[in-house]
Image (cartoon, grey):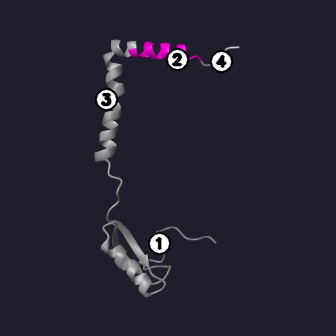
Amino acid sequence: MSSWFSWSRWLGIVAKEFIQLKRDRLTFGMIVGIPVIQLTLFGYAINSDPKHLPTALLVAEHSEFSRSIVASMRNSDYFAFVGEAADEEGPGGCWPPAVRNSW
């Protein structure tokens, strides 16, 4: 009984596709060109490293450990502190706006 997969048929299809690519330059250009464009865009043009995110800070405990974490966050370029909340309600009543816990 023969297997459902045949290596000789598979190699025949691969050879046929390469012959067709040699005939059709536009398809070959798209097969090579589109991945190169995507690599360029995703590698250089699109920056997925967030910097200067607006951040509000709520510190419940003012220990040496929490002060060192806050100082580390302030010294990094990832956060831009916009305020410091005294309690969970914050300066405007609710953060983020229009979102409240229903429990």
Mark number for residue 3? 4
Q: How many marks?
A: 4
Q: Residues within 10 Å of mark 1 (few under 14, many from 20)?
A: some
Which tag, 2 or 4, sits closer to the chain's start? 4
Rendered location of residue 90, percent (x, y): 45, 79
Mark number for residue 10? 2
Which label lies toward us, 4 or 3?
A: 4
Against 3, residue 99 (above or below) is below
Amino acid on which the number 2 mark rests in the picture: Trp
Are circles 4 and 3 on residues that touch, CB within 8 Å? Answer: no
Mark number for residue 95? 1
Question: What quarter of the picture does the N terminus occupy?
Answer: top right
The quarter of the displayed image where residue 80 is located: bottom left
Q: CA distance from mark 1 to mark 4?
A: 63 Å
The residues colored magenta run: 6-18
Mark 3 lies on a secondary structure that is: helix
